[in-house]
Amino acid sequence: MRSGHCDSPEPHQRRIVFGVSGALLILLALPVAVLTVPVWARWSAVRQVDAGAISEAQRRLRWSARFSFHDGQTELMQAACFRRLGQMSRWEAALESSRQKGANPRRWQQERILGLIRQGAHEVPENYWRNPLGADLRPHDAIEVCVRGHLARNEPGQAEQILAFWAAALPQDAHVAYLQGVYWFNQGDEARALTEFENAVTRQSGHELAHTAVARLFEKQDRLAEALTAYVRFAAGCPRSTTAVMGLARVLRKLTLMEEARAVAESLRSSPDRFSEFWGEMGAIELELGNYQQALHWLAQAPAADGQKKRELLGDAAMTFALLDEVEVADRLFEQVDADLATTSRVSELLTQLAVAPDRKEVADELERLSHAVAVAAGQPARIELERSGVVRREHAGSTAADLYALYCGACHGANGDGDGRAARHQFPRPRDLRTDGFRLVSTHNGNPTGEDLEKVIKRGMPGTSMRAFDLLSENQLQRLAQEVLQIRRAGVRDWYVALLQAEEEEIDEQDVQQVVDLRSLPGAIVPAPTIGPADPAAVARGRNVYLESGCRTCHGDDGTGTPEIAAFDQQGLPVWPRDLVRDPFKGGHEPESVCLRILAGMPGSPHPATKTLTDQQCVDLVHYCGSLSRQPKRTLTNHQRFLEATQRPLPAAIPEATADANSAAGGCP
């Protein structure tokens, strides 16, 4: 007879009992959780905010939001966090959400006033900082709002008074030290500001705002290696801070560590606290990598942003559209950037006027109108997605030469060729002034380019600069573009010479003007280049002797990597640096024939002279030696890094003399 224990109903019954009991416990615990979790989470968030750990506070508030419904308290605290972080568009959104969910009217009004005070749009009540508890405020919150409010209203004396009062009361307080740093930064003393920010981090290792201030100050000063270290420390001290992660990604991008930057930024892809900076940074990385469609994909997803962040988003999107040959779209976006800058500048001007004369009603009314317009605009996403979805690729084979120029060149070189297009301010070196500047890559003795010279530059671009290659244009389009540039050149020379005659009150002789225009725009005789055969060790050795004896080493250094102490300037007086023949790409390309032309014809408009004294054999040997110095891969620098290379080099006291010496001593190297 089989045992009957397997057929016993007891185990099955026990499972049913346990399941029902568990369900009952959950049902009983849920009301308790709904009542207690939000209270605990909000209390804990307040403690984190007091310690400066804003991101951790926001995490606790997300827990509160899961269990609290329609009371508005959590959203009101989220608004306070956004205010502390200076994210005022998100503050406004959270504040409105809390009102709609029935937040306590007195608390809601108090938070609204605190936000207005911070922005300088409301007077600073003295009792807020002298007796914050009496005003029902957290002390750190009250102190920060009042200090920032006075600074926003251009009242540094009152801000200093508050800080002195609280520094005496709380001499070792991290947040007071942080606010002292804010004060000194506002006053332009970045060294003292950095000291105070570091004091705050030392006193409270998790003080997110102080970490942010240290890292961004290094970044502002272009001390990128120190900024990178500061962001790594920031991420370690505040592991939940998205600000730390995005700052780390941004600095890696500025250091051209693009893949590392992308990996760091993408770590936030699934984060619940992503904001516009995430999409903007991903777009900026793809833009630098040349993935323009992917850049627009990210930029177009960015939610509403305000202030500098929105301008950066629009600027990157405009650059991307310009590089995709959608110049009209780029112009519209650049116009938005300009309009936003003008509004911001006007608001700042009005705040200053009110600080001096608070009774001027017309100023207050204009400020209120502009502030409302700024708030409405801040809540609107950038029109990047609309522009992206509305772009229709066009064929321009039948366009006029002027149309081709406006489409492909105008965004950088300007509508009339003066080098002041809307994208120019984002580039270094700045785009060429086609009207009067020297053209760098020429094949003529007189330094004026031929049409073929310009076609080559347009087609292949100029490596090491922002001048991209337009290698998809047809031969006919290249020819017409080159002729349009030459016409712009002739018009520019004419305008320059006529203005010069008028300034000197000289009679304008049309025949004389035409002669000057021809002299400065028509190409001269072609520089005869020797035949260049394959390199051999003997030719390279002879070329090194030519390099040393001809003066190339003066600018390019003994080893070809450049001489940092040389003070050199281009035709417009802007600083330039000698080419690193080892790591940098050559502007005209690395082909021996191109290098030979740079030696013999020079680079007009730059300190690089034409070499007249070398024999054909010496020129060939020098070309081979320059080629032997070159190493792969070549450096790829961003516009920002090129700017730093040019401007952070030490300049001798006697700049004109040093420049003249460098220009006269420079040899015939590319």
Image (spheres, grey):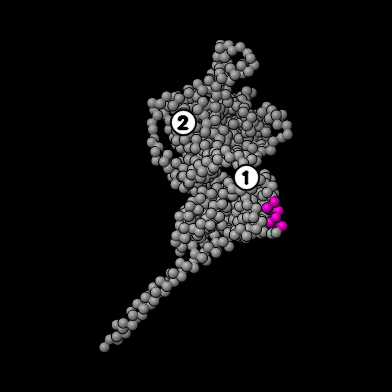
Q: Residue at x 71, y 35 (%)?
A: 652
Quarter holding the C terminus is: top right
Q: Is residue 670 above or below residue 306?
A: above
Number of residues whose C-alpha sits closer than 10 Å to that of mark 1, classed few (under 14), some (14–19) or many (20 or more): many
Q: Which mark is residue 273?
A: none
Q: Amino acid at mark 2?
A: Tyr
Mark 2, residue position: 408
- The residue wearing badge 1 is 153
Foreground pick, 529 / 370 = 370
52 or 37, which lies in front?
37
Q: For the residue labelled by badge 2, is the local secondary structure a helix, a strand or a loop?
A: helix
Query: In the image, is residue 124 part of the stretch drawn in magenta?
Result: no
Query: Which quarter of the rendered picture does the N terminus lie within?
Result: bottom left
Horizontal arrangement in the rendering, residue 305 relative to residue 142 (left or right): left
Q: Which residues are magenta?
A: 161-168
Report the Cα–Cα distance between label 1 and label 2: 45 Å
Quadrant assignment, res 142: bottom right
Q: Position of residue 353 (x, y in %)?
A: 62, 39
Q: In terms of secondary structure, what is the magenta stretch mainly?
A: helix
User: Furthest residue to the bottom?
Assistant: 1
The local crowd at label 2, few if under 14, some if 14 to 19, many if 20 or more residues have their Cα within 10 Å, is some
